[in-house]
Amino acid sequence: MTRGSRATTATLGILVVTAIWGSTFFIIKDAVDKIDPIDFLAVRFAIGAAIPALVFHRRLLRLTPQQWQVGLALGGLYGLAQIVQTVGLQHTDASVSGFITGTYVVLTPIILWIAFKARLTRMTWAAVGIAVLGLAVLSLSGVGSGGVGESLTLVGATLYALHIVMLDRWSRTMDAVSLTVTQLIGVAVTCSFLGLPGAYRIPSDPTVWAAILYTAVVAGIVTMLIQTWAQRHVTPTRVALMMTFEPVFASAFAVALGGETLTARLILGGSLILLATFVGLRAGRADTTNPDLLEHITTEHPPAPPGPDHPHHPTGSSTTRDRSTP
């Protein structure tokens, strides 16, 4: 597969992941009305981690302590983001949560700029601005007085943006499957530990279990595998822009399956997000004042050194998020 075809396949993979995430909003919103959010996440990621850990246990046994540290640390960061966002969703409207979570699009290049001295192109910043405007039109119905839910959701968005950047820097320390599984274990451990104080209460409602299994297997294992591979071939900012499709998919599922109405705001917001995505794809590569960091934010993808359990692949970005799934 050529570099160009890998990039195209990776882009389509990110869109599939984003569509799956968009499908989870109306499912999880109903589930967390019947179960504590941390309990939901603990069971969800326990299942999501146990299945691939059993399948790939031989691969995991070959990992070094340093590789385990990387995977568990990334998973812990991701787990904190999931918890903060899901708890915040209980205290604010889903539309407000969607908009605030979408600010990770802006926070990602800002973190690159602050932490790694990345200098992004004007077109990239324009695309980010259009994406934020589209997200606002599509999702914002009023942040009100800026309460607990909004604040928690903004913290979650910041953690997701940080995870995008850190996974980009660390993803090449091991193969995609091992990194995926160790992160899932890290998420499960984080959610389980933070859920201990209140004890676990899992209802017998079959709809809750359906939501747990869907989010654990499809929105968890499948999407993380696709995303971890795909993001090796695209930059963090480009991935973030592609993921602005999520509110479009979320709205489409809400209209088709959740009984919501197709409005002018929905059409306008979705159109702006599509425009932002196409502008971002044409934005070219990012630049940096530090040549040692160039490989982490460039779209040119210089190859990473192959290793025993690290097949030769181009470098690129990595986000692993079940990102704005609440």
Image: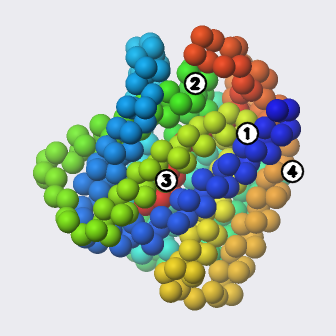
Residue at 20% x, 66% y is: 204
Q: Which mark is residue 317?
A: none
Secondary structure beneath disc 3?
Answer: helix
Q: Which mark is residue 218?
A: 3
Q: Quadrant of residue 279?
A: bottom right
Secondary structure beneath disc 1?
Answer: loop
1 vs 3, front mark: 3
Cβ–Cβ under 8 Å for marks 3 and 4: no
Q: Quadrant of residue 27?
A: bottom left
Distance from the alpha carbon under mark 1 to that under mark 3: 23 Å
Left or right, 82 with respect to 118, comes to left
Distance from the alpha carbon under mark 1 to that under mark 2: 16 Å
Residue at 53% x, 30% y is: 177
Distance from the alpha carbon under mark 4 to that under mark 1: 13 Å
Question: Which residue type does callout 1 highlight?
Answer: Val
The residue carrying mark 4 is 282
4 vs 1, front mark: 1
Question: Which residue type does callout 3 highlight?
Answer: Val
Distance from the alpha carbon under mark 3 to that under mark 2: 21 Å
Q: Which mark is residue 234?
A: 1
Cβ–Cβ under 8 Å for marks 1 and 2: no
